[in-house]
């Protein structure tokens, strides 16, 4: 479980996060949604320590990340898997080397042990045998799956994903969502996904927080979001005539 309490963050005079609190539970897909520039990525980065919040705390199963020393932070960092935008694979490394990277960084396992883990993760994302390919030889969906394999290589307790569907066709996007969903349940991971993909919201949004104007404007599930009378949520989720019409049939 991850708890965030009263997170504030500014960049100079741009006051982006104005006191966000939420609880993200184990084995659950937690989505952070909101308009462009609403601070979703900034919140994610505050949670993983890539930004220092100006105020507030981020608590990983009782451990307050914002108040730990460097070594204690590294211990939590080892429990975190990340899949950031554009998969962020190393172009000069093969699929195998990319997935092995965190194991090389954080473990003292033998080469055989690491390779066994890499192959297990590649099999899990349906990429068995693709070890020696380079990112340039992969489709967008395959790159995402390599990114997921790398993110789970260390058997994370926490998984952070920023825009998993960007650049993917709708069908591939749904497959990636389903994969994240399955892995989250299978390994009881606390998963936090930043997205503005409405298919994801409706498909895997077990727990959603909606950011607006630097604050948590709404919180609930995908079932609840379809029936909320919160105006900002409705304007965001059902922005097009098509989605408005679909909502009326729900
Ligand atoms: N490193 C930074 N330095 C200065 N300003 C930043 C930085 N990162 C984000 N911002 C600003 O913070 C605000 C929120 O940005 P953020 O990327 O968190 O929004 P977002 O909701 O993830 O947007 P999008 O959906 O477009 O990716 C924006 O005004 C952005 O310019």
Image (cartoon, rainbow, N blue to C red):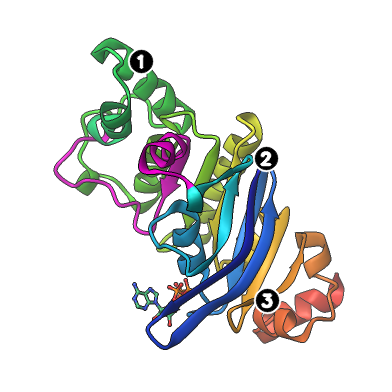
Which numbered disc covers residue 177?
none
Which numbered disc covers residue 26?
2
Looking at the image, is 231 positioned above or below residue 107? below
Which quarter holds ligand 1?
Answer: bottom left
Q: Report whether 39 appears left or right of 216.
A: left
Q: Note whether residue 202 is visible.
A: no
Q: Earlier along the polypeptide chain: callout 3 or callout 1?
A: 1
How far, Cα to Cα, is label 2 from label 1?
26 Å
Q: Earlier along the polypeptide chain: callout 2 or callout 1?
A: 2
Q: Position of residue 128 (x, y in %)?
A: 37, 25
How far, Cα to Cα, is label 2 from label 3?
26 Å
Q: Earlier along the polypeptide chain: callout 2 or callout 3?
A: 2
Which numbered disc covers residue 237?
3
The reply to whether the residue tagged 2 has its Cβ within 8 angstroms of ligand 1 is: no
Q: Note whether residue 43 is visible.
A: yes
Q: Which residues are magenta?
A: 68-95
Residue 108 vs residue 9, the one in the foreground = 9
Q: Does the residue at mark 3 contact the one at mark 1 (Cβ under 8 Å)? A: no
Q: Position of residue 157 (x, y in %)?
A: 55, 35
Q: Does the residue at mark 2 contact the one at mark 1 (Cβ under 8 Å)? A: no
Q: Looking at the figure, which quarter contains the N terminus?
A: top right
Residue 57 vs residue 119, the one in the foreground = 57
State the residue position of label 1: 116
Q: Position of residue 206 (x, y in %)?
A: 73, 53
Q: Residues within 10 Å of mark 3 (few under 14, many from 20)?
A: many
Q: Quadrant of residue 218?
A: bottom right
Q: Position of residue 84 (x, y in %)?
A: 39, 54
Q: Secondary structure at mark 1?
A: helix
Point 41% across, 43% down: residue? 69
Name the front one of labels 2 and 3: 2
How far, Cα to Cα, is label 3 from label 1?
43 Å
């Amino acid at each position: 479980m991850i708890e965030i309490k009263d997170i504030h963050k500014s960049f100079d005079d741009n006051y982006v996060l104005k006191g966000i609190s939420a609880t993200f539970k184990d084995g659950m897909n937690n989505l952070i949604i909101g308009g462009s520039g609403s601070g979703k990525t900034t919140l994610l980065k505050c949670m993983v320590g890539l930004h220092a919040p100006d105020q507030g705390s981020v608590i990983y199963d009782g451990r307050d990340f914002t108040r730990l020393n460097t070594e204690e932070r590294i211990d939590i960092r080892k429990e975190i898997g990340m899949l950031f935008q554009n998969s962020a694979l190393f172009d000069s490394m093969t699929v195998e080397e990319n997935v092995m990277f965190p194991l090389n960084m954080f473990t003292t396992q033998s080469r055989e042990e690491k390779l066994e883990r890499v192959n297990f993760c590649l099999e899990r994302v349906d990429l068995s045998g693709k070890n020696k390919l380079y990112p340039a030889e992969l489709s967008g969906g395959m790159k995402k799956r390599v990114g997921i394999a790398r993110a789970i290589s260390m058997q994370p307790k926490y998984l952070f994903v920023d825009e998993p569907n960007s650049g993917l066709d709708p069908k591939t996007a749904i497959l990636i969502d389903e994969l994240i969903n399955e892995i989250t349940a299978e390994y009881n991971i606390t998963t936090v996904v930043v997205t503005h993909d409405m298919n994801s919201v409706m498909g895997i949004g077990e727990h959603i927080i909606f950011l607006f104007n630097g604050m948590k404007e709404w919180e609930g599930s995908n079932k609840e979001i379809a029936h909320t009378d919160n105006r900002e949520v409705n304007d965001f989720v059902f922005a097009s005539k098509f989605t408005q019409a679909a909502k009326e049939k729900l």
